[in-house]
Every structure is written in structure tokens, then in C-alpha cells.
Amino acid sequence: MKQITAIIERAEDGTYSIYCTDEIFSGMGDTINDAKADMARQMAVYKETALKEGFRYPDFLDDEYTIEYTIDALSLMNYYVKAGIFTLAALEKITGINQKQLWAYTTGTKPRKAQADKIRSGFLRLSEDLATVFA
């Protein structure tokens, strides 16, 4: 089974884009799920067009494949805040960054590397905690 790696990023306008690292496919949408669905539609249209026009397309489109999605910590944070899953108060506890600064990051301010690392580390600790509960 083919494994495809795709990167999820949040654009400055708040939408999400997904692009494959080793394939030609991508997608965009207002949410991560919209972007995933858009990429799936584009993959299907590409195959359909290739069959109709008689040109080659990636063999894996005829078989089963999986897509492994990767998202950077800042995009993940913005996604969960926008979805109402995390509050800035909760993220302050997770990351150690004050709410005012986190709000600035959710509205377009780019964090310094040290701050981005704190966000990533906070999510990793949360992930490890959840993994012990659901192991």
C-alpha cells in the first residue's frame, strides 16, 4: 500500500492548504477537512481526466493508499482555537505563553522560534498525556 505524506498549513487569510511532499496533489479549504476533501476531489479528477485523455497517472491511484498528514504547531493551535476546542486560557496552561501573546499569534503575528518551540512542546506534552490515557 502506498503511503503519501502531505503537509497542512494555515494561510494568512485563515484558510488551510495541503500539499503532498512527493506527489503533485494539493487542496485548499476553509477548514482542514475541507482542504483534505478538496485534495481527494482533485486526485479523482486527475485520474478521470487521465483516463479520458489517455495520459499516464500515478499507479497508486488504482490501488489502496494512505495519506499521512503533518501540521505545524502554530497551524494546529489556530485550528483548535478557531474550532472552539481550545481557549486561549487553556493554551496558556499548555504552552506557558500568555493569552495576549497567543491571541496575537492567532491573528497573524509570527512567533519567534523560541515561542514556536514552546507551542510545539506544549502540544507534544498534551499528546503524551492523552496517549497514556488511551493506550
Image (tube, rainbow, N blue to C red):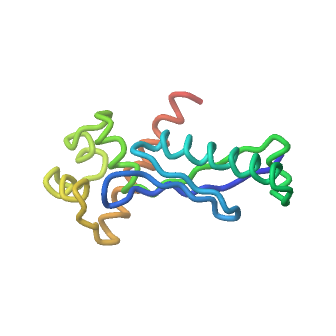
Q: Residue at x 63, y 44 (%)?
A: 40
> Residue 130, percent across and down?
48, 34
In this rendering, the answer to whether 114 lies above or below 61 is below
Q: Nearer the viewer, residue 7 or 57?
A: 57
Which residue sits furthest bottom? 113
Q: Residue at x 55, y 45 (%)?
A: 38
* 15 left or right, relative to 129: left
- Residue closest to the eye, 66 or 54: 54
Please tell me whether residue 114 is drawn above or below residue 41 in the rendered image: below
Query: Residue visible at 44% across and 47% down?
Result: 29
Q: Does residue 38 appear left or right of residue 117 in this picture?
A: right
Relative to the observer, which residue lies in front, 103 or 53? 53
Q: Is residue 31 left or right of residue 87?
A: right
Quarter of the image that includes the N terminus: top right
Going 46% across and 44% down the picture, which residue do you hit? 32
Residue sticking out furthest to the top: 134
Where does the C terminus fall, quadrant-wise? top right
Residue 64 image offset from top left, x and y in percent: 81, 40
Task: Name the spot of residue 33 as percent of width and height, x first.
Answer: 49, 39
Corner quadrant of residue 73: bottom left
> What is the number of callouts on the image?
0
The x, y position of residue 95, in whole percent, is 30, 52
Q: Is residue 16 shown above or below 115?
A: above
Residue 82 lies left or right of residue 23; in this view the side is left
When asked about the image quadrant of residue 100, the answer is bottom left
Residue furthest left in the image: 100
